[in-house]
Structures are given as structure tokens and as C-alpha cells.
Amino acid sequence: MQITHNIQKIGSKETIYIYVTIEDVYEFGDENFSDGKYTNFLSRLRKYVKKNFNELGKASVVLVINGVVIGTVAMSAILPKTEENIGNNTNAGKVSIYKEESKVEDKEEMASQKEEKTAAEEEGKKEATANTYSSNTKKTNNTKTTTSSVKKTTTNTNKKTNATATNKTNTNTTNKDTNKNSSTSTTSTKEQKVETIKSGIYINLNNNGVVSKIDIEEYIIGVVAAEMPASFHTEALKAQAILARTYAIKKAKAGVTLLNSTYHQVYNTVDQMKKKWGTSFNAYYNKVKNAVESTKGKVLTYNGGYIEAVYYAISNGSSELPKYVWNSSYPYLQAVSSNWDKDLSVGKYTVKLTYEKVSKKLGIDVNKETEFNVLSKTEGNRIAEIKVGETTFEGNKFRSKLGLRSTDFEITKTDVGLTITTHGYGHGIGMSQYGANGAAKAGYTYKQILNHYYPGTMLGNI
């Protein structure tokens, strides 16, 4: 297990990312940060935090495991209870549930990751050998190779619930034709040269305050690497690439400079991918790159225009209508079934909140005698309205105030507070990423996945 960290500064706010790369299979469902359960995984994480406490104790900490954002935690949630008051950490004693549409790793994916990684690494070695031969041949023939330096960057945490995009492809275009028209260049890194993709279409990217032009296909590689686990099925990665490209090109054509942040889309540099993937870097990078290259230039449209390419992590068995989240509607964003990820254990999550904390978050007095009544549900089987005592909340507002993962939840009252169990993760609109992975495993192509989650849309070119 490898652990590293980076500090990201946005304005006056500092956020620290702790990156954990796991090579073995760990059952995260058995880990519990809040009660301090001492396991091998937590033992190593605590040792790292303790060793770097003077630096890590100065800001909120975002925990990223195998490239997936797990949540925002304070030092007291990671360190043993006897060490909660080390130093002058102002965050001591605070634990916050990550409120945004973070992606979480499926246990089934973790269990199968070793087998997939081994096969992918073998393929990566073969490709690396072929690339080396090709490079040497070009050098002998005095053929120029384009290189570009990679600037280090870190991911931002200001996530917006409507982040991420989708795009379109011409259904008559085959992967063979796409690859035939592809061009690649080489990006230099400290250890090796990594192939990227070039299209000649550039967007403006704001990387932690530094604005630069970047080829859109190179950008999409970094976005897919950041937004979806590389262990997912290739067809799911292709669907993600099309969504990310659609989102980016729609913003770019509107004159928007894309932020390397969840406000727009998170983008990972090659160096960040190496930190996330460790020894699996070659296999995962080539897997993501190939998924992007096979859909090069493809976007998702409706009536000739780019769609609102929104997606989320895990469904409760159905997607949702945008009117319950953004008070808007689109003909291609409907409540469709997503049975592929309905019963995933990773989609079920329980949080405990004291009555005092609930009262503070909701802005009303809540106690053991307070009644909670669901008044109505949405087409996607989520809570549309809930009455707490004498106050009525929209389901999405209630979820946001309490920092819940989903608006599909059940509440149980205890002597000291509420036990809330949620189903799914995210706003529920558009494509479920885990649903896409499940559909791909069931034999769906990326075109079929996109047609299912965005009915009536068409695949086309930028």
C-alpha cells in the first residue's frame, strides 16, 4: 500500500488530498473511520497521518483510495482517540460526510482488480515494447516526434452537483475508422514516455490558476482517469469519454475556460495518475487512452445541439428527473431503470447524526418526539417531499442540508439521534457510472449504454 499527499490551494482555502494506492484486496465495508476500528488499512493510514501531522493538520483532508474520492475527514477521524489533540489542529473533533457526487469503489471491482490488472499489465508491456521499436525506427529515419511537458497539478474539491458531461457519436462510425484517423504524440514524464492523443482542437484549461491551451483529446484522457475508476469495463469508459467530451466542447464553444475542479470536470495529469495507480499505471493508462481514442471526436447531441451531459455515481435502481434537483426539464433526461447497480453493497450507506446536529443543519428543533413523514416520492423512487415536525422540506434540500448521499433514504430514530440509510450516490440524473459498468458487463456497448440513459439522443462529431 502506497500513501502520498498533495496540498491544493483555491483562493485562501487549502485542501489536502491523501492518495492511497492499494495493491491487495481490502474490504472497505469493514472499515469504520468514525468509531476508530483498528485494522491493517487504518493502521497504515494512521501512521502516515501521525508522521505528517504538522502539515496535514492545517487543512481539511480529502481521502482518495485507488483514484476514487471517498470523502472529507478530519484528523480526529483517522487518528486513534488518544491522539486526537495532537498539536493545535483546529479541525480536531470534527468529522464531515462528503456532500458531493464523489465516486466510490465497488467491492466487486476491488475483488476482481488483481486479475484484471495482471492481464492489462501484460498487454501494456507488449504495447510498450512495440512503442519502443516504433520510436527507434522513427529516430533512425530522422522523423520528428512531438513532445510536450506535463505540469504537476492537484484536483480541486469544490464539487457541483451538476458536474460532468456527455457526448455524441455517429452510429455509423466504427472503432476501426476512428482509430485510423487518430494521431498520437508523446508526453514526457520522469520515468518513461507516455503516448497521448492529438486532434488539433484545443480548449482553455485553468489548472490551479494557470490557464493554458490543451488538446481536447489529451484533456479527455485526464478527465476519464479522474472521473471514473480505470478498473471499470472498457465500454463504460468509452461512454464516460463521450460524456466528458460533450461537456467540455459545449463549455469551450460558449467561451468558458474549464476549471480543473469538480465545478466543471476534474482532470488528472500523468503524474497524478501514477500516484493513484502505482504499479498498475501502464495497464490503466493504456486502457483509458484506448477508450478515449476509440471514441475520438464523438459527442452526444439532441436535435443537433450538445446535450446537458450530467451523470452520477450509483443509482437506487432508477435515474431521476432534473425538475427535482434543478427545477428544469430536458426530453432526454428521464427516469429510466438502472437495475445493474441497484443491489450493489457499495450503494447502501448508513450515517448516524445526533439530534443536536440535525437541528443545527435543518434550522429547526428536532428531538426524539419529532415525527418524520414522507409526503411524496419522485418518478425515480426518491423522496420528493418530507415533513419534519411541522416543517416541510423538498427531498433534495433535505439531502443537501444533512449531507446525505441520496434522496432515497430511510430514517430510524434512536435515543440520541437519527440513523439514516441511503440507497445510491448522487443526484440521480443522467448516467449512473456503476450502472454503466454493470451494463457493459452484461454485454451492452457504449452506444447502447448512452441510448439507454439518454433516450432520443444521437451520436455525432464535434
Image: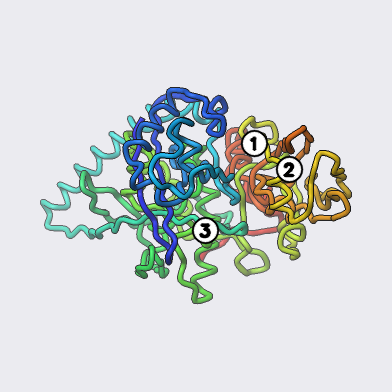
> From the viewer's perspective, is residue 212 above or below residue 411?
below
Specify the quadrant that holds the N terminus: top left
Which secondary structure lies at badge 3? loop
Dot 3 amino acid type: Asn
Which kind of residue does numbered mark 2 sit on?
A: Tyr
Q: Nearer the viewer, residue 84 or 412?
A: 84
Residue 303: quarter of image: bottom right
Instruction: Find residue 65 and report its image quarter.
Output: top left
**Front tag of 2 and 1:** 2
Mark 1 surroundings: few (<14), some (14-19) or many (≥20) residues within 10 A: many
Image height of 102 relative to 324, above or below: above
**Is 139 on the left-hand or right-hand side of 431?**
left
Determine the image quadrant of residue 304: bottom right
Mark sitting on residue 158: 3
Q: What distance separates the C-alpha of mark 3 from that of mark 1?
A: 23 Å
Depicted 254 relative to depicted 26: above or below: below
Q: Which mark is residue 329?
A: none
**Residue appearing at x 49%, y 44% in the figure:** 92
Residue positioned 73% across, 53% down in the render: 362
Question: Mark 2 — residue?
Answer: 355
Disc 1 residue type (three-letter): Gly
- How far from the left and from the top, in percent, is residue 89? 43, 47
Q: Are marks 3 and 1 in contact (CB under 8 Å)?
A: no
Q: Where 217 sits versus 254, above or below?
A: above
